[in-house]
Image: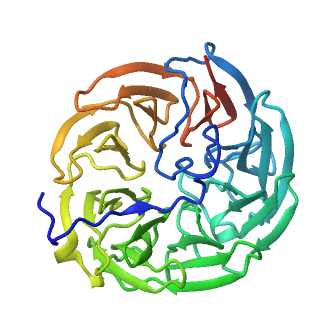
């Protein structure tokens, strides 16, 4: 596709974790926030009994992904009173845990918030009360429980601050993970009404800026997407999909820069991914699309007509985030159909059934893409123009969380356990 401006604009992601060791996976979608791991010697094949280094029961229930930093694993969970972890109307403890990555030993288990069951909203059957993924940076852990609050801990589980003043009426529970930008912790709060996006001072938890979402065509206001920060000539931009439109903000002060509208799209989940000067997003329910949107320094206001380069409606994802590998765009539908696409043009190279149903986002390492489905089956393909399945691995347990990769191992969370997979 020909670009619509006279000079190439290089767009790069701003990574808050660029200095982290190659073995680390410190946040949702990995060290660069794009689903890639630089780790080598990652296992290709496993089962419930083979290539399992350890398997550890995790108390309660949570679909937050594990993160890995300096030989420790961090994750969150919601522990319901009583034996039924899916029960409605019961009190819960919202907790953060730390495990030793080598042995699987739980090193600490910290109470962050108490949730009153009589006032807790019902969640979607595929959601949990602990779905956003922790972030680890510079000796601090940031945990987010959506409408229930956000907290910062030190590496021994001591709470540094809590933020509980930003309550909002969720629909289906919590979802999207925050993103760090300099001294800010930024997250979307696309509730059933009055949606907004907010930045907290990561040192204190106090609100630095808060921006109400501009009006969009969508009648349903709730969404769950994780923002992405990119750098363009003229300054960084925060790309944040919401119901009915994707918005770009100045991450420093929350000023809205531009938007692209997509009608009634709601419950948007995929995290944006970048390639060159184009951002790729999903548009949510009821009919998902993948959009390729050109970004430049002069983008201002509604740029739907001028900057929307292409749209794919066939087998687009509702839930899993996308990947760029070797100049190709890969994504998978919730039904398990994977696609390989030319990112400049939106031309489909191949679409093939890989797995399904899908909720977890795929990860890439060693030239392979790992697709973990909700049944606990992980199909591994070669990342390329030719479709090739390399392995099919069944852990034998339900899983909706995305995997973490590091230390030559895969850390895979199921409904009740955390596994370390390694040769």
Q: Quadrant of residue 215?
A: bottom left
Q: Quadrant of residue 71?
A: top right
**Percent of width and height locating residue 273:** 39, 56
Q: Give the residue drawn at x 29%, y 23%.
A: 388
Left or right, 217 with respect to 372, comes to: left
Q: Give the residue drawn at x 36%, y 63%.
A: 11
Question: Is residue 47 positioned above or below 58 on the image?
Answer: above
Q: In which quarter of the image is the N terminus?
A: bottom left
Question: Is residue 99 positioned above or below 48 on the image?
Answer: below
**Percent of width and height locating residue 211:** 51, 85
Q: Quadrant of the C terminus?
A: top right
Can residue 372 be seen in the rendering of this structure?
no
Front residue of 265/136: it is 136
Q: In which quarter of the image is residue 50?
A: top right
Front residue of 142/182: it is 182
Can residue 304 be seen in the rendering of this structure?
yes
Front residue of 79/26: it is 26
Q: What is the basis of the colouring in this image?
A: rainbow
Q: Give the residue drawn at x 38%, y 67%.
A: 266
Residue sticking out furthest to the front: 7
**Percent of width and height locating residue 84:** 73, 44
């Amino acid at each position: 596709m020909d670009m619509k401006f006279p000079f190439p604009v290089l767009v790069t992601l701003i990574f808050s974790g660029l200095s982290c060791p190659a073995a680390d996976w410190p946040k949702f979608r990995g060290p660069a926030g794009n689903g890639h791991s630089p780790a080598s010697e990652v296992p290709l094949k496993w089962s419930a009994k083979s290539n399992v280094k350890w398997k550890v029961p995790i108390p309660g229930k949570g679909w937050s992904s594990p993160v890995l930093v300096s030989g420790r694993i961090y994750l969150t969970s919601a522990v319901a009173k009583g034996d039924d972890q899916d029960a409605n109307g019961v009190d819960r403890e919202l907790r953060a845990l730390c495990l030793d990555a080598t042995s699987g030993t739980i090193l600490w288990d910290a109470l962050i918030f108490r949730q009153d069951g009589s006032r807790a909203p019902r969640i979607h059957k595929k959601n949990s009360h602990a779905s956003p993924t922790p972030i680890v940076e510079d000796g601090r852990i940031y945990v987010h429980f959506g409408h229930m609050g956000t907290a910062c801990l030190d590496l021994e589980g001591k709470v540094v601050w809590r933020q509980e003043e930003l309550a909002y009426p969720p629909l289906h529970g919590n979802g999207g993970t925050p993103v760090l930008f300099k001294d800010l912790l930024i997250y979307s709060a696309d509730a059933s009404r009055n949606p907004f996006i907010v930045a907290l001072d990561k040192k204190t938890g106090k609100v630095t800026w808060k921006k109400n979402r501009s009006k969009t065509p969508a009648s349903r206001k709730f969404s769950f997407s994780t923002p992405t920060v990119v750098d363009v000539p003229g300054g960084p931009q925060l790309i944040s999909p919401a119901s009915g439109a994707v918005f770009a903000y100045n991450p420093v002060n929350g000023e809205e820069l531009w938007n692209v509208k997509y009608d009634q799209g709601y419950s948007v989940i995929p995290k944006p991914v970048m390639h060159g000067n184009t951002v790729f997003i999903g548009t949510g329910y009821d009919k998902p699309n993948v959009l390729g949107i050109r970004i430049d320094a002069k983008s201002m206001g509604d740029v739907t007509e001028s900057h929307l380069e292409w749209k794919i409606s066939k087998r687009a994802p509702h839930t899993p985030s996308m990947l760029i590998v070797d100049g190709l765009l890969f994504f998978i539908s919730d039904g398990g159909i994977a696609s390989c696409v030319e990112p400049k043009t939106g031309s489909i190279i191949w679409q093939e059934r890989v797995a399904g149903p899908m909720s977890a986002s795929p990860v890439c390492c060693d030239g392979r893409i790992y697709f973990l489905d909700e049944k606990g089956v992980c199909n591994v393909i070669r990342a390329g123009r030719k479709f090739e399945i390399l392995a099919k691995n069944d852990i034998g347990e339900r899983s909706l969380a995305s995997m973490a990769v590091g230390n030559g191992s895969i850390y895979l969370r199921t409904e009740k356990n955390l596994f370390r997979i390694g040769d």
